[in-house]
Image (spheres, rainbow, N blue to C red):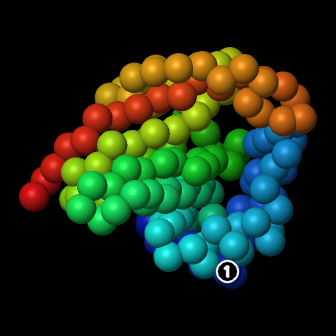
Amino acid sequence: MEIRRLDFSNAARCAELEQQLFPEDNPWSRDIFVVEFAQPNNLYLGVFDGDDLLAYGGISQLGPRHDPEFEIHTIGVDPDHRRRGLGRLLMQQLLAVVDSTGGEVFLEVRTDNEAAIALYEGLDFDRIGERKNYYQPSGADAYTMKRPARSEK
């Protein structure tokens, strides 16, 4: 297994996984991933087994460089490779990038996604709010979660 930065050549596979993982919540298309990968303040990583992309995740840096905050945009694991720690591995890599700057991290997660909530709480995220009907078109609610700033400087 290897973690690598994602690029345009990975967009179709990410979109394929999105369709499997989030079919009722307007999964991102290949074109959306292409746009996301091109943004200078975004970082998307993938877990690969050879050339096979098994998991992906993305984060964005917001605000000024001297006082940034970060937002997890998406994270997903191929259903055939769940329960192997790939989501945790990706989150740890993304959070290591954050920790080098000391910024806070935010994310949204479906209130019924107990596995993801447990992962995030295990990585020191706290629930700070709830967004009704956040995911569309399903109308599922989301928790907003936050991890306080840390620094490895």
- The residue that appears at 76% across and 42% down in the rendered structure is 21
Residue 86 showing in the rendered view: no
Residue 139 showing in the rendered view: yes
Q: Where is residue 76 drawn, in percent x and y?
A: 63, 47
Please, is residue 6 above or below residue 104 in the view?
A: below
- The residue that appears at 78% across and 56% down in the rendered structure is 28
Along the line of sight, which residue is nearer the eye, 4 or 43?
Answer: 43
Left or right? Give the position of 112 relative to 143.
right
Q: Where is residue 122 drawn, in percent x and y?
A: 36, 26
- The residue that appears at 64% across and 68% down in the rendered structure is 36
- Quick one: SS at disc 1? helix
In the image as oriented, which residue stretches furthest toward the left? 153
Examine the image and state in which quarter residue 113 appears.
top right
Along the line of sight, which residue is nearer the eye, 122 or 35?
Answer: 35
Q: Which residue is mark 1?
A: 8
Please, is residue 127 above or below residue 152 in the view?
A: above
Query: The C terminus lies in which quarter of the figure?
Result: bottom left
- Name the residue type under label 1: Phe
Please, is residue 70 above or below residue 40 in the view?
A: above
